[in-house]
Amino acid sequence: MEKNTQDTAEYREPQREETTLQDPPEDETAKLQKDLRKSEKSVIRYQYFFLRLILFIVVVWVLFFKVIGITHMPNGGMYPRIDAGDMVLFYRIDKDVRAQDVIVLEKVTPESNGKKQQFVLRVVAVGGDTVEVTENGHLVVNGNAMIERNIFYSTPRYEGYLEYPVKLGKDECFVLADSRESGADSRFFGPVNKSEIKGTVITILRRNNL
């Protein structure tokens, strides 16, 4: 009996070694959190940058390919107000032109072999008007001789191209160069249809000021 008691007293259960994961030091945890926040802010800044860049590209594309156009004056037909080589800004959307508007247009002429040529010219009559260019060099619209204070030349008739008087259709306009004695305009290629108008000129950038 005494032997069993002794054996029991001598028996010991094996001790278990307990292991615990130590948390990183407090200052190291704060540093990791700070680096993470900095990384997140950097990603957000790049995202905003690319979004603004894409928005800027879209705005420029819409502005200069859908709303505003830019071209150069191809000849001296609008001298002295617009000289050859001047940059011309025009508004694309509004095609309902009025008399005295200066417009950019593309037109197939009798000498262009079927190819469109670009012109910058002044509207002198619109749909429904009747236009006459007299033999003595006067412009007559709806029976009234036009007094154009901004034109310094007579308006000769170009023989062999157009028969007068010309009755304009609903979507047509009659255009003339300000340099009337040599400009290529409706006296040469006839009335302009609305579909041939690219836009109305809004400002001029002089070549010698560029």
Image (cartoon, rainbow, N blue to C red):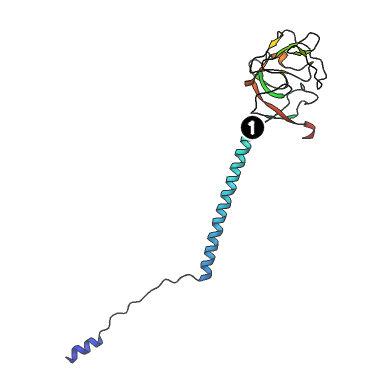
Outermost residue on the right side: it is 152
Q: In the figure, 9 relative to 193: above or below?
A: below
Q: Nearer the viewer, residue 74 or 157?
A: 157
Q: Is residue 139 left or right of residue 128?
A: right
Q: Considering the image in quadrants, where does the N terminus appear?
A: bottom left
In the rendered image, residue 69, in percent from the top left (x then y), is placed at 67, 30
Residue at 66% over, 19% down: 107
Q: Nearer the viewer, residue 69 or 200?
A: 200
Residue at 76% over, 17% down: 183
In the rendered image, residue 54, in percent from the top left (x then y), is placed at 58, 42
Q: Is residue 2 visible?
A: yes
Give the quarter of the image for residue 178.
top right
Outermost residue on the bottom side: it is 2
Q: Considering the image in quadrants, where does the C terminus appear?
A: top right
Residue at 56% over, 49% down: 47
Local secondary structure at mark 1: helix
In the rendered image, residue 14, in percent from the top left (x then y), is placed at 29, 79
Q: Is residue 108 visible?
A: no
Give the quarter of the image for residue 203.
top right
Q: Residues within 10 Å of mark 1 (few under 14, many from 20)?
A: some
In the rendered image, residue 11, in percent from the top left (x then y), is placed at 25, 84
Q: Is residue 17 left or right of residue 183?
A: left
Read off the residue under disc 1.
Answer: 67
Q: In the figure, 35 relative to 188: above or below?
A: below
Q: Nearer the viewer, residue 75 or 6?
A: 75
Q: Nearer the viewer, residue 15 or 94?
A: 94
**Amino acid type, callout 1:** Val
